[in-house]
Amino acid sequence: MKALTWQGRRELSVDEVPDPRIEAPTDAIVQITSTAICGSDLHLYELLGPFIDRGDILGHEPMGVVVAVGDEVTQLAVGDRVVVPFTISCGHCFMCRRGLQSQCETTQVTEYNSGAALFGYTKLYGQVPGGQAEYLRVPLADYNHIRVGSELPDDRYLFLSDILPTAWQGVEYAAVPDGGTLVVMGLGPVGQFAARVGVHRGYRVLAVDPVAERRAMAERHGVLTYDLDDDVVALLRDLTEGRGADAVVDAVGMEAHGDSVVEFAQHATGLLPDPVARAFMQKAGMDRLASAYASIDVVRRGGTVSLSGVYAGDADILPMKTMFDKQLSLRMGQCNVKRWTDDLLPLVEDPRDPLGVMDLVTHRAPLSDAPALYETFQKKDDGCIKVVLEP
């Protein structure tokens, strides 16, 4: 089959690789019909090379049709149309029973003290072959699927794999009071959906992004948007009676604009031999925290900051005095996809499309175009907000 493989920093290729096969009786094989490039895939493209091997298959936002099942699979049959959540979980352990599927004790990657295994996402999360490919092996398939109907297009359902539940969880964790104000930092795909979820729930939503096309897209869905500049925190405070927002969703993460020193250190780490770089990143890695700092600044006293953007540093410096003095709540974490499926499935199937799932994709292309589109997406060229690949 053809699959997108990692070959080095900013170097990807579409190669012929062996077809996946049933390796355990609980596996299924899915033929991929749509698979998206996620903002967190860019961390693999740019920063996390020490935890990837050449030839690893990327991608964790896939859907398709079941073409084979193992002998112990009882909830799926050949021909079923499914979305595959990016987290791999069992559904019955202590964590899964509590709705914390991203912490699944059955698939935790204990070697790196990480949570549940993920598709296409480095040794830190199990080095499981990903879904930017023609076929995907799905472990523990009875639980790791969302069965969907056959009538609606893929775009109605595809984002249930990651970014839509990630945004929903981010807003849920933000604990915005009824009629309150939510600020969303960053209007990439997760930020777009977080802002729309906020509007859907009746909040006043203010969002910040430096890219005009992203702001324009959000404005189509009732979001008030602002450019990223030195005055934006003060402006947002002025718009919230000087107090700040009730809650902030940081949908940017570790590659935020605004910290050239840490950016240099991140890139320098990537030049070290992999074993040295891995050890450094696990103990002394640092993120670009401009978005997190701005979120802490703009939230009101007693408010909540919800981190949906990926952070990976273990030596980050947070303004603890400010956070303590402002009595902030901080929520974060990898998305527990299956926890939110029942909430979201009716919304994506609603003919009114209240979350605008049909207004997100800006670039659609065959799998062969994936390497070039990673670069386009990273550089935010050509109005690129969301890429869907069709193997």
Image: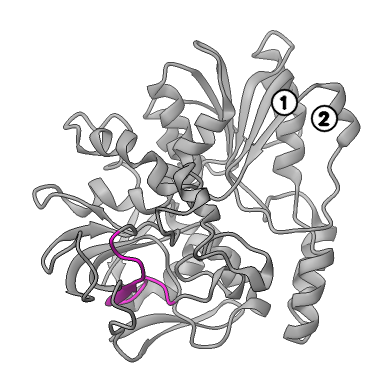
Towards the viewer: 59 or 111? 111
Quadrant position of residue 85: bottom left
Give the mark, 1 or 2, whose residue is nearer the N terminus. Answer: 1
Q: Is residue 105 left or right of residue 218?
A: right
Of all residues, the one furthest to the top in this rendering is 241
Question: Does the rendering let one see residue 361?
Answer: no
Give the percent coordinates (x, y) of residue 207. Answer: 56, 30
Residue 342, magenta (yes or no): no
Taking the spot 33% from the left edge, 91% from the top edge, the residue there is 18
Residue 140, magenta (yes or no): yes
The number of numbered discs placed on residues in the rendered structure image is 2
Towards the viewer: 85 or 274? 85
Q: Identify the magenta region.
A: 129-142
**In the figure, 298 relative to 94: above or below?**
above
Q: Which amino acid type corresponds to the residue marked 1 in the rendered image?
A: Val
Please give the residue where the numbered disc 1 appears in the rendered image. Answer: 298
Q: Nearer the viewer, mark 1 or mark 2?
A: 2
| Marking on residue 323 | 2
